[in-house]
Amino acid sequence: METNNGPFYQQHKLLSTSAAILAFTLSIALSACSSGSPGSNPTPTPAAKTAIQVNIGDSPADWMLAFSMNITSMSLTGSNGTVSVVSSSVPMEMMHLMGVMQPLSMINAPQGTYNGASITIGSATVMYMDPTTKQPMQKTISGPMTASVTFSTPVTLGTTPMAMGFDLDLASSVTADANGNLTMNPVFRMSSGMQGSGNPGDFANGGIQQMMGSVSSISGSSFVMSSMQAAQNFTFATNSSTVFSSTSMSGMAGGMLVMVDATLQADGSLMATRVQSMMSSGGVMGGGIVTAVTGQPPTSLTLVMQNGAGTGMMSSSFGAGVTVDLNGSTTWQMDEDGVDMAGLPFTPVFDASHVHAGQSVMPIGSAGMVSGGMGGGMMGGGSMAGTITASEVALEPQGLSGTIATAVTSGATTSFTLTLASDSAFSTLTGATKVTVFQQPQTTMAGTSPIASGTRIHAFGLLFFDAGQWKMVASRIGAN
């Protein structure tokens, strides 16, 4: 009988042993590849991302005409760490955002839960009415000033794009000492909404109304717009439902000054619902509160500037004075976008004979703004940023706040009296203590309804001086 100790057997045994050793070695190597080096943790899978439209707005301080600030940084904090919203200085004027909001930034953020934000303001400029001299005055608040915002309820970001709104409570943020020196401890309140819920045109759900800027580039049916008061450029798509005013998609050109309404889409993009051309390249547009009307018919207006775009417009213009030169060729318009003007019990008029201190207007010129200016002697301790020669002046919606004596109900068609605060800049400027507010079928009610009598509210709309009374046709009403 043969024994298993021949050369063939020994070779076979050697090969089997080598194969076992090789298999064990491969097993160790594969285990190391899947688990990382000894003592290390596996690389985590990055969280999926969803678009967040970050908006900013203002709960008013009645005594201010303008509040211009520089946001130097902003971030969100949550379950997946910190997400940057603003990384370089962005100028923002807040009083023109009373009761409304505008986009600050669009970000793609990791899905998860968010519970807070940090916002740093580099400096701020306040323009207000001196109650003694009745003149606009300007003061600067040095920074930096940081707000840590803790969300009252954590916000969960899933696969649906979201809007986050940060409302600056100016009345609670800015205080004055006995010598009139101002300090700021910024107080922000956050609210959130989802794309596709509620009114798509409402900023709470990602809607954009009358965003001002200049066209940077055009590609197919989309265009990119830059805004002086935003952290980035915004891309807007258009379709067959987009309403164009004074232009068309084929007529869009670089440098064109536009006003845009848009809605947030399910894929996180922005769809323009209305595009209005205001002026071609090389022109300028502004926005602010009239503090003086010179001449009858007027030859010039003095404004406290709150917004702007175009040639010669600088961020330093916000919260400063601007002279608007007028002539016989200047045209006068009412910006009725979003304002229901049907069936009013009075006839709204805005022209050279019906422009008044206290109204918000937008001067538009074919030439750029020229730096410097005199201001008609109505800028007291405030600086003058420049002069605009207006080919057109448009009446723009503005915000006022006050107290109501009767309850206000959503969906009603009525009017009510808004009693202004005793330190209201509008009251100091005009002498008025009350404004009649007209609530129309398309007026939006923000928050809960009804709003009880005795509540302090804000109203946003077009303001007219008619038959010796101030009257506002409101596009939006909400409790402060």
Image (spheres, rainbow, N blue to C red):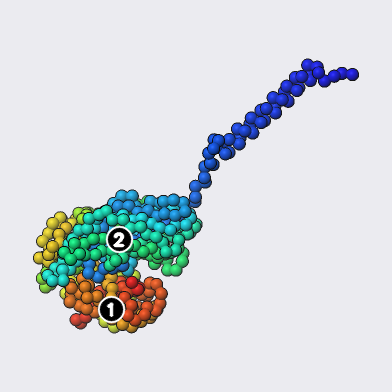
Horizontal side of residue 260 vs 110, given as left or right: left
Q: Quadrant of the C terminus?
A: bottom left
464 in relation to 303, above or below: below
**Sequence-earlier tag: 2 or 1:** 2
Question: Residue 417 location in percent, x, y?
Answer: 28, 81
Quadrant in the picture for the N terminus: top right
Q: CA distance from mark 2 to mark 1?
A: 27 Å
The residue identified by callout 1 is 418
Q: Nearer the viewer, residue 76 or 40?
A: 40
Q: Is residue 13 left or right of residue 441?
A: right
Percent x, y of residue 453: 34, 81
Looking at the rendered structure, the kind of residue marked 2 is Pro
Looking at the image, residue 150 sits to the left or right of residue 71; the answer is right
Disc 1 on helix, strand or loop? strand
Hey, which residue is sitting farthest top in the picture?
7
Return the mark for residue 186: 2
- Residue 139, image x and y in percent? 18, 60
Q: Residues within 10 Å of mark 1 (few under 14, many from 20)?
A: many
Per the image, label 2 sits on a secondary structure element best described as: loop
The answer to which quarter of the image holds residue 260 is bottom left
281 vs 320, nearest the viewer = 320
